[in-house]
Image (cartoon, rainbow, N blue to C red):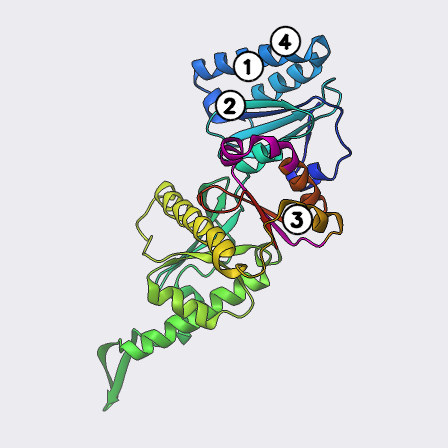
Amino acid sequence: MATIISVSDLAKLPELQAPVITLNLNLRKLSFDQSEQLRVKNMLKKIQKEIGAGIEPFITDVNDLTREQLPYEGMTVIADHLGKNVYHLIRTSVDEADYRIEDSIDFLLLLSEAPNMDYTLIELNRDNSKLYSLSNKRVAPLEIKDYPSTVQEALGEELRGGELNFSARGGNAQYHGHNETTQEKKIDQERYYRVIMDFLKGDQALAAHQFILMGLTQNINLFKKVNNGLNLARVEVDQSVQNQSATEIANLVNAAIEKDNRENTADAITKTFKDKLFTDFTNIQNLLNSQDIRHLFVASREEIKNNDPEIYGQVNQMIKQALSQDANVTVVNEDHNAPLVSAV
């Protein structure tokens, strides 16, 4: 049976016996699309024809996995030519089923379909808040016991803006409406956000998460001002999501994450590491051999195949080596001017 594994742990395995199969599957399409089911069936026949009769255990494992209706968008299955060692990885953005049979694992194919990080999303309004989870690009409301979802719940009798004012004359109480000064409401909002922050820090499971803030710019800025220890993501959704559905929020957040990934990957190469970047292929390999690489940048598999297909296998070995040393590896999909391989 296939063993679930992460990309970094896969890189630390001993070399699988060649030829090695790397197979990407779109599980969502497979669950309802008959043409996709036929396409994958034919793909498995091609693999079986290329490898030979000994690959039946791999074919069986793939069929078993696809029948399980696993709760994620896609999957990559890795196997050696005998099908004795079979691994599968969770994927979140497999567009088309694809496979490669090479001397080693195709890490370029793997990283082009790398899973997104999971986040906890905080919806920030002036007097209420909600939590959502983002997992495998999908958003779902989080129901956390005792979470202060409204300013009233958080502050109770200490709420200042909006409380009733009264005066007593001759034993008769006279009410004069609500005290709703802008300044007092702002104080309440700041105190409310501190309560939210303290609650999240005090929850052992949530405190380890990375949080994406969603709300009007002034609300996000105020929360960042009072933040004291929460791990806030660089990504933000600076608009109100108060009346948005989970699907609409997912679209906004995923678009913001993708935009940030594009901008900051290019920024790392062209600005942040501009004067520190190694681009000579031999030099990078020597630095990897001496474990002196912190971050390896590689072009997309399409860029490498189009510009210098002869180095495809070498780049895959570089990625495996970097990952096995716990270095960061980024596939630069959006910048055609970036070097095919660079490192810092």
Mark 4 or mark 3, whichever is nearer to me? 3
Q: Position of 243 compared to 320: left or right?
A: left
Q: Amino acid at mark 1?
A: Met
Percent of width and height locating residue 295: 61, 52
Residue identifier under label 1: 43
Q: Amino acid at mark 2?
A: Ala
Q: Amino acid at mark 4?
A: Lys
Name the quarter where the N terminus is drawn.
Answer: top right
Residue 225 versus residue 59: which sits nearer the camera? 59
- Looking at the rendering, the stretch of residues picked out in magenta corresponds to 292-314
Upstream in sequence: badge 1 or badge 3 = 1
Residue identifier under label 2: 97
Residue identifier under label 3: 284
Residue located 55% across and 14% down the image: 43
* Disc 4 packing (10 Å; few <14; some 14–19; many ≥20): few
* Disc 3 packing (10 Å; few <14; some 14–19; many ≥20): many
